[in-house]
Image (cartoon, rainbow, N blue to C red):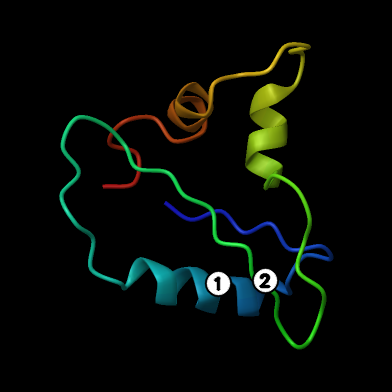
Amino acid sequence: MVWLDFKPSLPEPIAAKLRAAILAVPTFEARGGVVVFALNSSLWDSPASQGFPNPQEWSKAMEGRSEPMEIGDLVDKVWPAGAGT
């Protein structure tokens, strides 16, 4: 699964092409859980973001919560098992 967290957001046609290219990369078999990683990058000479990624989907999943959520639980809530397969 891919979440983009660019500020300002990418135009949707560019975001769609970027998601498609990322999803075209062959996956590997994870054993015992989901692998989550963040890649901090910038495009067109813009500055790289600072801090922890916070895609819109993650913010929406956290609405109404005042305490932190473990990243694995957050990913399970935003991307339930089998949703991207």
Say what secondary structure mark 1 lies in. helix
Q: Tell me residue 85's x, y (percent).
A: 26, 47
Q: Which disc number belongs to residue 53?
A: none
Q: Is residue 51 rendered to the left or right of residue 53?
A: right
Residue drawn at x 70%, y 81% is: 43
Is residue 81 shown above or below 53?
Answer: above
Q: Is residue 29 rendered to the left or right of residue 37?
A: left
Label 1: how many residues lie within 10 Å, few (<14), some (14-19) or many (20+)? Answer: few
Residue drawn at x 42%, y 51% is: 1
Classify residue 9 by image quadrant. Answer: bottom right
Foreground residue among 3 and 36: 36
Q: Which disc number belongs to residue 12?
A: 2
The residue to which callout 1 is attached is 16
Classify residue 31 by image quadrant. Answer: top left
Say what secondary structure mark 2 lies in. helix
Residue drawn at x 52%, y 29% is: 71
Q: Tell me residue 72's x, y (percent).
A: 45, 27
Amino acid type for the residue under numbered disc 2 = Glu
Amino acid type for the residue under numbered disc 1 = Ala
Foreground residue among 76 and 72: 72
Foreground residue among 70 and 63: 70
Residue drawn at x 44%, y 36% is: 79
Q: CA distance from mark 2 to mark 1?
A: 6 Å
Label 2: how many residues lie within 10 Å, few (<14), some (14-19) or many (20+)? Answer: few
Q: Are marks 2 and 1 in contact (CB under 8 Å)?
A: yes
Q: Tell me residue 10's x, y (percent).
A: 73, 71
